[in-house]
Image (spheres, grey):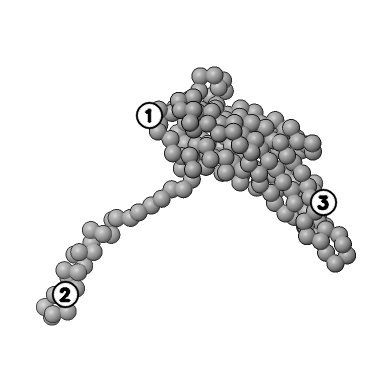
Amino acid sequence: MSWSRRLIFPFLLLLLPLGGCRVSYKLNGSALDYSVYKTISVGNFPIRAALVYAPLQQTFENAMLDYIQRNTRLQTIVDGTNSDLQLEGEITNYSLSPQAVGTDAYATQTRLTIAVRVKYTDNKNEKNDVDQTFTAYRDFDASMMLTDVQDELCRQISEELVELIFNSTLGNW
């Protein structure tokens, strides 16, 4: 065996055990101790905004429930009186505002903003309780009709709000 092969062989033997090691971080998982927390109650999120788009409530609630079920092992229950965790709130803002103004003094972009006030109650540890408003928005071309983009924008904004809420409550960030 040549001297180069003699050097390479031990080096490869040293690297072999390292091949199975890796560091991974999961940034969307929950920070819950499942020996303590077993159930969560997710209440309705009624629309209390001046401008109302009725499908938004169902879109947001479904997104919240789906995200919790995908990212935790909590059992969702309907009656929150006996749950370990409670999540409830209301949609407090649904508004449109002009953003970018063109040379003709008309808006070229419109912003749809949605805000949700959330009350998160940890029935095992009140230090984890959260009462906070979360806001997200999307801009769209002002030449488009809101009715043409509303469903998709509401879905996107709801998903962002759900992630913000999850990270602040169940994710314990």
Task: For residue 62, say whether it is visible.
Answer: no
Q: Residue furthest front?
A: 127
Q: Earlier in the sequence, mark 3 or mark 1?
A: 1
| Horizontal and vertical percent position of residue 173 | 49, 43
Mark 2 or 1, closer to the camera: 1
The percent position of residue 109, horizontal first and vertical second, equals 78, 57
- Calculate the distance from the C-alpha at mark 3 to the C-alpha at mark 2: 70 Å
Give the image quarter of residue 116. Answer: top right
Closer mark to the observer between disc 3 and disc 1? 1
Q: Residue at x 70, y 30 (%)?
A: 46
User: Is 93 in front, or is 1?
Assistant: 93
129 or 75, nearer to the observer = 129
Residue topped by disc 3: 145
Type of the residue with mark 2: Leu
Left or right of residue 167: residue 138:
right
Q: Secondary structure at mark 1?
A: loop
Q: Position of residue 66 (x, y in %)?
A: 56, 37
Reading the image, the residue beneath label 1 is 35
Kindly tell me whether residue 53 is visible in this rendering: yes
Q: Quadrant of residue 141?
A: bottom right
Type of residue at label 1? Ser
Q: Which residue is mark 2?
A: 7
Residue flagged by tag 3: what amino acid is it?
Met
How far is mark 3 from mark 1, CA to CA?
50 Å
The answer to whether 4 appears left or right of 48 in the picture is left
Sooner in the amino-acid sequence: mark 2 or mark 1: 2
Query: How far is disc 2 from disc 1 in space, using C-alphas?
Result: 51 Å
